[in-house]
Amino acid sequence: MWGFGRSVSFNVITGLNFSLSAGLVFVFLVSSIALGYVLFPARRWAISISAIVGLLFLVFFGFTWLNLLAVFGFWLLNFYSATNVKNEMTGRTKLNTRIALMSGLYPIIIGFFLMISFAAYQSQIVKDIEKTERLPSQIQTFIQQVSGQMFGSNIEGSPKQKQAILNQIAGEAYTGINNFFHPYFKYAPPVLSFALFLILIGLSWIFAWITMAVGLVLFWILKKTGVVRIEERDVKAEVLIV
């Protein structure tokens, strides 16, 4: 999972596409954790799971103060997630697994995005940007691909001439971007990691709905196989008397 997480950080910063494998692993992991909070409402489950995930993160990325801070944030968000799920599961007379899952998914997703962003802050690609004061060469390739899709049909000439024009457009755009951001490259690590976090937060609703669907499928499988079942019981309820 964390190997894929490093790949996602690299892809977002360089403007490349997300890895399908990273997305699938992330969705299944988040769905499993949230479903675990539904099946085991005790908060010690959240403490244990978030500690295991955080420890693996530290083993993969190193025991630094920043990583420890990211793990602590992940732990708090998972504790909050488990609390939300428990309130949904115990505060209703009729269980609604979909609402319970959704109430716990967002904090878990944000917690993962927080750790990925902190890892990106310390990644080699961000350090290289700060050191060389230039964006990665993959940015130029990305600009060239976008230019080809947008203007390729309007450029006249042979395929070789078209490619030369696209290379020139991408080169000039890449140089212009580097010149514009040159005074700010020394702030690259915090700026890029924060930008990555904002990008991931903007995508969080997509992951929330997908992970909820996967979680519901997993819960349905558990019900069909007899691992879990829903029973009706008499419970006491509080009423307000004036």
Image (cartoon, rainbow, N blue to C red):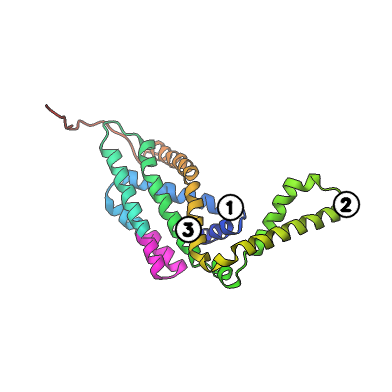
Q: Which residue is mark 2?
A: 158
Number of residue marks:
3
Which is more N-terminal, label 2 or label 1? 1
Type of amino acid at the residue the image marks with label 1: Phe
Q: Position of residue 21 (x, y in %)?
A: 56, 53
Label 1 SS: loop
Above or below for 6 versus 237: below
The majority secondary structure of the magenta stretch comes to: helix
Q: Are marks 1 and 2 in contact (CB under 8 Å)?
A: no
Region rendered in magenta = 52-72
Q: Residue at x 39, y 36 (%)?
A: 98
Residue furthest toward the left? 242
Disc 2 crowd, CA 10 A, few/some/many (<14, 14-19, 20+): few
Asked whether the beta carbons under mark 3 and mark 1 sit within 8 Å of each other, the answer is: no
- In the picture of the structure, the residue carrying the numbered disc 3 is 194
Q: Amino acid at mark 2?
A: Ser
Label placed on residue 18: 1
Residue 220 appears anywhere in the view: yes
- Which mark lies nearer to you, 1 or 2? 2
Residue 59 place in picture, x, y as percent: 43, 68
Rendered image quadrant of residue 75: bottom left
The type of residue carrying mark 3 is Phe
